[in-house]
Every structure is written in C-alpha cells, then in structure tokens.
Amino acid sequence: MTRKTTNDWLAAMATAFSLIACYGTLAAIAVLGALGVTIALNEVIWAGAIVLFAALALVALVFRWRRHRQNSPIVLAGIGFLLIAFTMVISYERIVELAGFAFLCAGTFVDWRIGRGRGSDVA
C-alpha cells in the first residue's frame, strides 16, 4: 500500500473502529448474555476507546484536509466527535450518541467523496 492509499483509509478505519468499539461490544455482550456468559466490562475504558477512535478519525481528516482544503468534512466530523465525547464523558444520551456517530460518518463519507472526485491530481 502506498502512503496515499493508506492515508485515504485512515479516517474510515478509525470511524469503523469507533463504531465497532461501541456497538460491536454491545452486540458481543448481548450474544454472550444470551448464551449465559456474563462479562464485567470497565465502562471508563470502553468509553475511552470509543472517544479515542473518534478523535483519531478527526485527526486523519485534518491530515486529509491539507490535500483538498474543503472544510465540510472537518466540521461534520468535529461536531460528531464533540457529541460522542460529550455523551461518553459528561452525560450519556442514546440520541446524542447516535447523532455523533452520524456526523462522524458523514464527515468521513464527504471526505471520501471529495478525494474520489479530485482523482489523481491530488498529491
């Protein structure tokens, strides 16, 4: 993989890891609970991992911003990160969490579309 290709996928991977850390863990706990297995999960570490991956996605988008100079992915992902961080650290609300992930995913998607539209002229 070239550096250009790797940078193209960093934001998407970090966003996916944040989603998996949140909802994948919930799904795994639900499946194991249905099988009769209980798990003691440290919620602080769990929330920290979710926020960390969301922050990594935002940082990756900032690095990609240096290529295309479009602000919309940064604004969308920034709002998403703030909503996710707020709901994980300050006051948990399911709807705020979902909105945060929607904004983070939208920012990543818009960045991906900008990168595709620019083609090979992006250095």
Image (cartoon, rainbow, N blue to C red):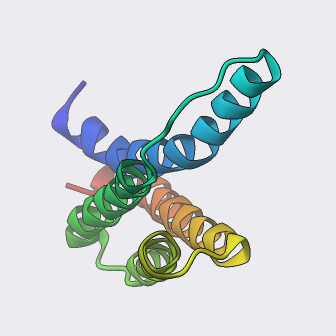
For the C terminus, give its image quadrant: bottom left
**Image quarter of residue 57:** bottom left
- Residue lying at the far right of the rendered structure: 34
The answer to which of 21 and 89 lies nearer the viewer is 89
Question: Which residue is found at the position 49% from the left and 71% from the top?
Answer: 84
Q: Position of residue 64 (x, y in %)?
A: 27, 62
Q: Position of residue 27 (x, y in %)?
A: 70, 35
Q: Position of residue 5 (x, y in %)?
A: 30, 37
For the N terminus, give its image quadrant: top left
Question: Which residue is found at the position 37% from the left and 80% from the top?
Answer: 70
Question: Which residue is found at the position 73% from the left and 75% from the top?
Answer: 95
**Image quarter of residue 73:** bottom left
Left or right, 93 with reference to 83 = right
Left or right, 94 with reference to 50 = right
The answer to which of 100 and 115 lies nearer the viewer is 100
Q: Is residue 29 above or below residue 81?
A: above
The answer to which of 12 and 51 lies nearer the viewer is 51
Q: How many marks?
A: 0
Q: Is residue 28 above or below residue 8?
A: above
Q: Position of residue 112 (x, y in %)?
A: 48, 56
The answer to which of 84 and 38 lies nearer the viewer is 38
Left or right, 86 with reference to 20 = left
Question: Which residue is found at the position 31% from the left and 56% from the top?
Answer: 52
**Image quarter of residue 89:** bottom left
